[in-house]
Amino acid sequence: MRTETLPALDEGLADVRPTARAPYRKLLGTATIVLFAVLIPLALVWAPQDAKQGDPQRIFYIHVPAAWIGFLAFFVVFVGSIGVLRTGKRRWDDIAASSAEIGTIFTTAVLITGPLWGRPVWGVYWTWDPRLTSYLLLWLIYLSYLVLRGYVPEPARRARYSAVLGIVGFLDVPIVYLSTRWWRSEHPTQFVFERGGLPTEMLITLLVGIATFTVFYAYLMTVRVRAGRLQEAVDEEVFS
Amino acid sequence: MQNLPPLGIHLQGVAKAFGRQVALRAVDLDVTPGSYVALMGANGAGKSTMLKVVAGLVTPTRGTVTVGGVDMRRAGPRLRAMVGYVSHETMLYADLSGRENLSFHAKLHGLGRGTDAIDRAADRFGIGSYLDTPVRSLSRGMRQRVALARALLHDPRVVLLDEPFTGLDEAAAIGLTETLEELATPERVLMVTLHDVARAMSGPRRLLALAGGRIVIDRPLREADDDVAASYLDLLRTEVAR
Amino acid sequence: MSWIAPSLTIAGKDLRLELRTRDVIASVGLFVLLVVVMASFSFPTTGEGRDAVAAGVLWMAFMFAALLGMGRSMAIEKEDACMDGLLTSPAPRESIFLGKLTANLAFTGVVELVILPVFVVLLRLAPAGGVPLLLLATALGTLGLVTVGTLFSAIAVNTRGREAILPLLVMPVSIPVMIAAVKVTQAAFAGGTGEGTVAWVLLMVAYDALFLLVAIATFPYLTEG
């Protein structure tokens, strides 16, 4: 048996162009904490109470940004998937897979905060509203992506297979939304959320929420993708 | 046979890993047209992967494979039409007859129903008597013969055979040896995986031996080259000892 | 176009195999028939929404048929490495996909055409003037389902769970075309076009076209080793 030692992990990364140098990651991490520190009082105290819905409405400041990230993350999965197929480089697969994992978390948060919001305000946990339904489907597609990855042990194949699913899944999402919207529009029991004319304070809080979650997503991505890169460097050792 | 330039095979820095399992490491190989190469090595040494890489079934993790100067990653129909490949598995539809399998292959290669080619193959491999029975009901040796007939049906210029002698009885083996001798002309390239050193001596003109995914022996063969046999057997002993 | 001939050759080979073994149509057909019969026991004989429930049940049955058939079809290529035989042949990767797609459409279509009259009779539906629409819905919906399914079956067959994972991959992604198919079928059962039926049909056409292109473009990447 050979008794070579593996080079230090950081050495192995010399020729892997890092997207997440330590300063970026730390910066994003700090920014996340700061933004949350701002968001929480804004959402809980500063934003005015909704006239019709009362305090439960405040979940909106988490629910909507999380929903936005759910879509953003899936778009990144799409971009990563195309990268995998076009270049065959593992770094794109890292991006796609990381975004899928993180996106699933945010999407789950949407599906949990939705009913939490719905129950006190409208009296039901769930409704087949187009947005919620498409969100449920998005969540299912995310899950099928993750399950598929678990079923393919070989990394190169796993990357290609999930890439195809990522591409098909992403292109499907708008179609899912359209079709559930038409489907439900034939039934009048749709919950309309009056988006028009949000009071300025609510709007500001919402925007802060979106910014917070976006930065949080970016931070999580840098952490997860770096872990993937380290893994890649270790795996490359298999050839020496 | 069309008037095409002779095809050679070229591997440069080819490595292939399936996850953590490395099948080939940094292989450089040049096989000129007219070569008849015996590919040997212990099980797991990388012979099958090497042939699959040349056949374009497996993309190397690193390095490039070219056949006739064309990267196999971008091989088009015309290049693939010139390759004949036999693997461990038969690549035959078990519920169809040998004739139906050959006919399907012929159609994919633009040979129409290929009746002439099939008849010739039937003669050459002695499969005429069971060509119309479902492959499922044939013995291992019979299937192997049909598989060989299929691979050579379209008169390929690049012949890649992975353990073609497995399952063949002595008569069939002699027949195959002769067929390969006939095929080894200046316009063709043959790479054949073998386990039997004696067979390597009767026909092939170059011996490649792999161990641990690398080429460890690469030398020309002449009749009754005891030297080569000895070095190959040494290699196997070292492999076994590991 | 050099895609057509190999596709037809491959589809023809699948057809020949199926006629020889009657593998897919027999087992799938019987299974789906049983599903339909069982469903008809629990079926409301009158009332509002009957057409909608009927359409839903029908498409569930069609989906079972398609999933079973497509899984089996790719599994055949996995046996004895026959897919390697196709990949080393001059047939373009796209033709391999189109050939399998055509064969899958044919098999699923046959099962559907048997199920439909049985369904209509058992459930005492009266589509009358809606029959052309019913056939259109069946054709477009099946095309969408089988396009995505054939693509994913090339993935499924190479995973640890083999074909078992195919429904998990296909179902979420095919929801839009399924909803549309059910809606149009429902209108057909009611005897004619309902409101917005045209929109649903257009959705199916768009879905089918989009994913056919995506499948043709991405299939070659699934066959790399």
Image (tube, helix red, strand yellow):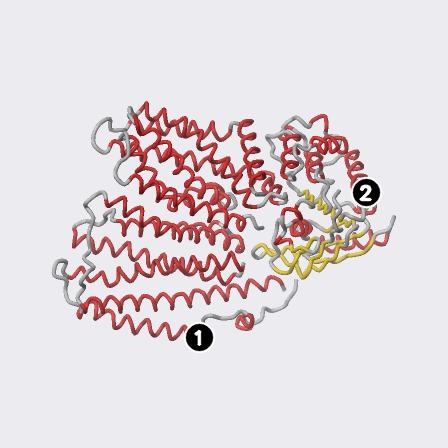
Question: Circle 2 sits on which residue?
Answer: B181
Q: Kindly identify the amino acid type of the residue bearing the numbered disc 2.
A: Glu
Pick the front one: B14 or A195: A195
Q: Chain of mark 2?
A: B
Question: Circle 1 sits on which residue?
Answer: A22
Q: Are marks 1 and 2 on the same chain?
A: no
Q: Kindly identify the amino acid type of the residue bearing the numbered disc 1.
A: Ala
Please give the name of the residue rendered at 50% of the width and 50% of the height, measured from the top-left corner: C217
* Image coordinates for residue B53, horizontal then vertical, percent: 65, 52
Q: Horizontally, is A165 left or right of B39 in the view?
A: left
Residue A198 in sight here: yes
Which image quadrant for residue B149?
top right
Q: Secondary structure at mark 2?
A: helix
**Position of C206 relative to B27 (above/below):** above
Disc tally is 2
* Image coordinates for residue B185, horizontal then vertical, percent: 81, 46
Q: CA distance from mark 1 to mark 2?
A: 63 Å
Q: Horizontally, is C21 left or right of C35 in the view?
A: right
Outermost residue to the bottom = A23
CB under 8 Å between discs 1 and 2: no
